[in-house]
Every structure is written in structure tokens, then in C-alpha cells.
Image (cartoon, grey):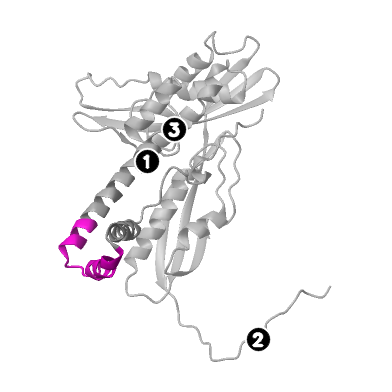
Amino acid sequence: MPTIDLVDLSQLPPPDVVEPLDYERLLAERKAKLISLYPEEQRDAITRTLELESEPLVKLLEENAYRELILRQRVNEAARAVMLAYATNGDLDQLGANYNVTRAVMEPDSTFRNRIQRAFEGLSVAGPIGAYEYHALKVNEGISVNKGDGKGKGEYQTVADVSVISPSPANVTVTILSQKWIWEKDKDDKEDETHNGIPSQDLLDRVVIALNDEDVRPVADRVKVQPAQIMEYQIDAVLYLEPTPESEPIRKLAEKNMGKYVEDQHKLGKDIRLSAIYAALHVTGVKQVELRVPTNDIILCKDQAPYCTSAKLELRKTQTSDCSRPNPDPIVGGYDE
């Protein structure tokens, strides 16, 4: 069963309707227009006047140009608000409503946007792979949190990712990766970042019920819903720094990049590649990256998800190299057989 290919919205070119903003260009255009309104014999004098920053007329033009910049930015934001790739919060909710897709409890924009992309798959019963994925993710819409137990604290899970394979005709295996959320009384729900992705039995049962609905599952299909197999790994690296008085900003940027890579790869069937880890850690100010673990690429199947249990970065100063000795002659051309 092939994997459904969704358009990578982050790779789309910038929309033409969104205009690049340039305050200096707007100000220059206003000055040029003002000069053109004067008789030709007065234009040189007005031009010299507009070269004075302290001139009240210049201040007025600067204020007008700034207000025009703000207005154009508002137009840009309004244009982005109706595009799936850029819409957020309530604007994204409105786009989802166009496809009869509603946001689940505490569902982030990225996950909700992904479900909206799959909306047309929901027009089919769960025969195509995209339909199975859509109906499994749609379970999130029906998850409600009972906060009336008197404890004032609790947790719940939602579907984070789905993979679908057909090991044999009419047999379908659906694998579920989950997110865990923590709620407390009078506080916003927050994601439990220590959760490894193994779904609870309650969440699996919800998916089973959804996919076996008589209006969803084809009569001949036999559907098996299973939890993701979590493949744990660690990252331990040494960053050798260029000569610099400040190392903490370098550490923070490397940690941020590494955290984003780890988060992005925590999905079903996502591999952990050494080259990607090197790229994430080799930020400005880093001369060399020594990766202790992992030592090899981690290649996963569609029912497996990587989970980083620990990430350690050690910073060291680069030893000054001795460049007094002559360098060998560079190799020109290819090698002889």
C-alpha cells in the first residue's frame, strides 16, 4: 500500500500577493511625488528642502510613509490568513471549517494544518491509505477532557501520527503514535515532552471504533490497530569552537537546532541520519563536530518511531594549528586508475 504524498507547504514559493516591504522606497516615492507637484522652477528648491532631516515637511512624509508601510503589512497579513500554508489560530480554524474539519482539544496549528490537507481523503471510505490516515487522525476531534473529577489535575492523549500498511490482501495494519497532554485547573493544557509516543489503550480503542464504523471500513477489510514501536536513541556530541569570547550563544543555537531535528523526526518511519545531526550542530562558531553517538544511521520501518532519550553537548576550544610547514601540492584533475 503506497504512502500518501502531501504537498510540503514549507517548500512552496512565496505568494506573489504578499509584497516585500521597504520603508525607504516608500519614502523616496512620496518625496518624488511631492516634488513633481510643484512648478518646474521650484523643484530644485523643494529637493534641497527635502534633504534636511529636521524639515517639518520631511517629518510629515516620514510619518505618512510609515503608516503606509503598516497598512501594506496589514494587507500582507490578511492575504496570508486565507492560505493554508500561513494561516494560524482562528484563521486556520476558519479554513478547516471549509472542509468540515474542526480543531481537536489543544491541537497545535501544525497538526491541524496536516489534517486539513487530508480532508479530501475523508470523502472516501477507509480503503485508500489516505482515508485510513484521515479517519484515524479525526479521532482527535472527539476527544474531550473531563475536568470535573475534583483532583484538579490529569492527562489525556491524542493521535500524533498514523501509518498504514497492507501486509496481505484485505488485511490492513494501522500504527498509532500519540501525544500526551497535561491539564491543571485554571491553567492551559501543555504537552508532556517526556512522552515517548506509545498510545494508551483508550486511544487505541477509539481508533478501532472509528475505523470499524460501517460507514468507514470496506466490508472485506480486516483492520488491525497497533501501538508504535519506539526505537530509543541518544545524541552525545563534542563541539570544537572557533576562537570566540562567548560560547553560550553557540551552545544555545546548537541545542535549538538539535531539539528541532529531534522533534521533527519523532514520527513514524522517520530515520535518524548522522549527516542531519552534523548539519544541525554545525552552527556559526563551530569548527568541528565530533559525534560520539549514534555511530550509524538509524533506519526505521513504517511502524517504528525514533525517540531521543537524552541529548548531550560538550563544548571545547579548538587547538591552534601549526601552519608554518608548507602545504602539499594540491591535486589537480582526477586520479589515475
Q: Nearer the viewer, residue 335 or 152?
A: 335
> For the magenta stretch, what is the residue range?
40-62
The local crowd at label 2, few if under 14, some if 14 to 19, many if 20 or more residues have their Cα within 10 Å, is few
Q: Is residue 217 magenta?
A: no
Q: Which mark is residue 113?
A: 3
Q: In the displayed structure, would residue 30 be above or below residue 204? A: below
Query: Which amino acid lies under the numbered mark 1 shown in the image of this protein?
Result: Thr
Quadrant position of the N terminus in the picture: top right
Query: Which amino acid lies under the numbered mark 2 shown in the image of this protein?
Result: Pro
Q: Which residue is at a point 44% across and 32% down the rendered structure image?
A: 113
Q: Nearer the viewer, residue 154 or 63?
A: 63
* Residue highlighted by disc 2: 328
Under tag 1, what secondary structure? Answer: loop
* Residue highlighted by disc 1: 194
Q: Which residue is at a point 37% across and 43% down the rendered structure image?
A: 76
C-alpha separation, residue under disc 3 versus residue under disc 2: 55 Å
**Image depth: mark 2 or mark 1 in front:** 2
Give x and y (percent) for residue 111: 43, 33
Query: Which amino acid lies under the numbered mark 3 shown in the image of this protein?
Result: Arg
Disc 2 and disc 1 in contact, CB within 8 angstroms:
no
In the figure, is residue 186 to the left or right of 268? Answer: left
The local crowd at label 3, few if under 14, some if 14 to 19, many if 20 or more residues have their Cα within 10 Å, is many
Q: In the displayed structure, would residue 232 be above or below residue 316? A: above
Q: Is residue 50 magenta?
A: yes
